[in-house]
Image (cartoon, rainbow, N blue to C red):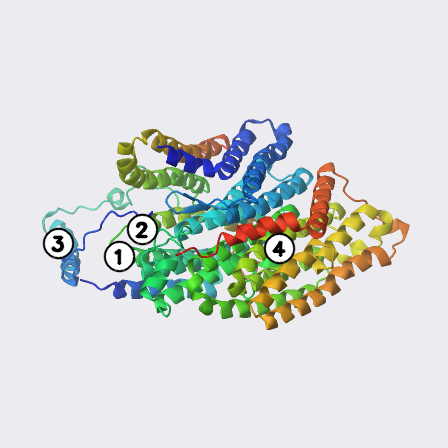
Amino acid sequence: MVPTVAYLAVSAVLFTLGVVGVLVRRNALIIFMSIELMLNAVNVSLVSFARQHGHATGQVFVLLILAVAAAEVAVGLAIILSVFRHRDTVDVDHVNLMKW
Amino acid sequence: MTTTWRELGYLTPELVVLLGAAAVLLLDLFLPRGRRRVLGGVALVPLGVALGWVLRALWAQSGGPSQLHKVFGALLLRDPYSLGFDVVFLVAAILGVLLSLRYVEREALPAGEYYALTLFAVFGMMMMAMSAELITLFISYEILSLAVYVLAGIARGRAVSAEASLKYFLLGAFASGFLVYGIALVYGATGTTVLYDPLGQSASTISGLILERGLFGNALLLAGLALLVVGIAFKAAIVPFHAWVPDVYEGAPLPVTAFMSAGVKAAAFAAFARLLFGGFRNLGEVWQPVLWVLAVLTMVLGNAAAIRQQNVKRMLAYSSIAHAGYLLVALAAYTARDVAIGSVLYYALTYTAMGVGAFAILLVVGQEGEANQELSDYRGLASRHPWAAAAMGLFMISLAGFPLTAGFLGKFYILNAALRADLDGLAVVLGLASVVSWYYYLRVVWFMYMTEVPKAAVRPISRATSLGVAVAVAALLVIALGVFPSTALAVAQMAGHTLLPLGY
Amino acid sequence: MPTLTTPIPANPAADWLPVAVFLVTAVLFAAVLLWIPRLIAPRHPTPDKARPYECGERVSGEFWQQIHIGYYLFALVFIIFDVEVVFLWPYVRVLGGRLIPQGLGLFVFFDLLLFVGILVVALVYAWRKGVLRWE
């Protein structure tokens, strides 16, 4: 049996990758994708915790996170699009009408 | 059978707001284009009804024993605490809608979406104050956040608005990633997501299990708590998670900024207090020093940055960070929690009145496309428009914390809690920070009353009735809370007592 | 306790070995399937046959072109139904099974109606805004 710690390690690595992606990349779309990666990393831990505890709370939470992530995608893409229409770029370094 | 229906009944104000949002959205689709101005009025109806229900429920409990109901298991709690915060959210939303009526029309914003999203955001806030379980907390947090991301960027024609929305969204989604990870780790460490049981019936809650299993030094749990704090501190605009605040507040449409600065922050603090004083009450020694540091950072940086601003909207944005710091002082005073939680609620209400009031004056003075927000635009305001200047002066001295205003009493109760918890150092920092804040608040007053402009440079102001009503309501609230605080304070204290430990 | 206590059986067979077997099988299976036609199929390539398959239509334009923004809106509407199914099933499975025997059928129905109703509002909104019309 694969120990829970292994899943948690994968999840932590994925989460860290997401965080690094957000901090390092400058393209708003890629940043956004990194954020989704973070959420899915959390899903991995939740499912493994749910199995460890032997009840479904964590799994239900995963479903809810998926729904929230879907809503976030809908809103996020619209926002990125509306910025693109103004600036013709989604590079966050160029989105600087105000002090960042 | 009846219990379940009754549980739904406890959610009346939330459901009214939710159905109101759906109604506004649908009405917008079927109304002819010219009639859409009524939507703002329509949006006021559910807000008013919900406020009436909440006040009646609070009134029924004042003096008597406070009532506490679990809804849907223990996912949500209908207690005086959530009712008290509902008042804050609803007042902020009503004032926000009043500010928007003219603005939405003038800037040609999509009215249906605007008011529906406002109502959705209020719904999220109300759920957030009620939630006593982490998954519910996360969902309400996201309902609130998604609505506000869009509201910040709803002026699609203005590049700054779109930009504010993008920054808010990217950083907000980043923060919510931390929040969910925190929830996952806490769930992993304890095996439950229920924060605490207010009736002391069940020990299998986070607070109960921490005691029972002695999880005080559990690495998983502590890491989870830290991530939760990061996620919520972001929404509450706490340094060092405040990077988005000035830009978003400056770029978002003014009424949205007003609503956000009061409502979103209050919601974040409502959840924060429930989280710390409820679920993690037994880890107070761990989180108190963290809050201590955050509070000092927030007060110092917020005030230091506000001093340098020439743009009044931006100045208010930074000063709202400082006010988040004052609220944090109350949260840090956890050994005096019998007064600390009440003072958070009281301060949230006073900040709503004076903060939204100040933004309302910005709308009165400001013109199309968000012009006239520089400090210099306030030159000689007193001689041109004495009423607007008087109201602005009132809001400024209240924000600065002068005696006989709501702001003074709010700070007084927070200081009281801090001193009772032996946080003398924090109290001193709060006092010094307030003194610093006098400079930039009083500078506005000085510009209004002590400087003159040539007649030719005099600009007109907005005289919309709705704006006038909003300013009057906010000003009356500031005065009432400052001069006759006893009722509001008693209610706040009662609400705060709901979070005190009863068993688990 | 609001925890949904559907037990998840601990699976003793969840070992690394099945994963390895699965991986090897998958690779072998794909390789064999690709290899068999090479052995037995006749090959007479013509220009028409070499073209990418697009449901019988003649290929027009490049593959790396921009995708119409309308697809984005369609995808959003899809989310409405997506979310609906994801939540209706567990809801019926767990709460329906527990509450209907208690005589709370009407409550469950009303609850679901509220949920679906909110999603319908979203759908009506999309419909009136013209998302469902392809232009």
Secondary structure beneath disc 2?
helix
Quadrant where the N terminus of chain B is found in the figure: top left
Q: Are marks 1 and 2 in contact (CB under 8 Å)?
A: yes
* Res A57 label: 2
Label 4 vs label 3: CA separation? 72 Å
Asked if residue C41 lies left or right of residue B307, the reply is: left
Q: Which residue is denoted by mark 3 in the rendering?
A: C32
* Circle 1 residue: A53
Give the CA distance from mark 3 to mark 1.
42 Å
Q: Nearer the viewer, mark 4 or mark 2?
A: 4
* Frontmost residue, C122 versus C20: C122
Q: Which residue is mark 4?
A: B347
Residue B256: give x, y in percent of width and height.
Answer: 61, 47
Residue occupying the point 28% across, 33% down: C102
| Residue C95 found in image quarter | top left
Q: CA distance from mark 4 to mark 2?
A: 36 Å
Could you tell me which quadrant the C terminus of chain B lies in? bottom left
Whether residue B54 is situated above or below residue B311 in the rendered picture: above
Inspect the image, locate mark 2, and give the three-letter code of the amino acid beneath it: Thr
Residue B321 lies, in percent from the top left, at 61, 61
Closer-to-camera residue (B228/B191): B191
Q: Secondary structure at mark 1?
A: helix
The answer for how far apart the CA atoms under marks 1 and 4 are is: 41 Å
* Chain letter of disc 2 in the image: A
Looking at the rendered structure, the secondary structure element under dot 4 is helix
Q: Are marks 3 and 1 on the same chain?
A: no
Q: Are marks 3 and 1 in contact (CB under 8 Å)?
A: no
Image side of residue B209 versus residue B27, left or right: left
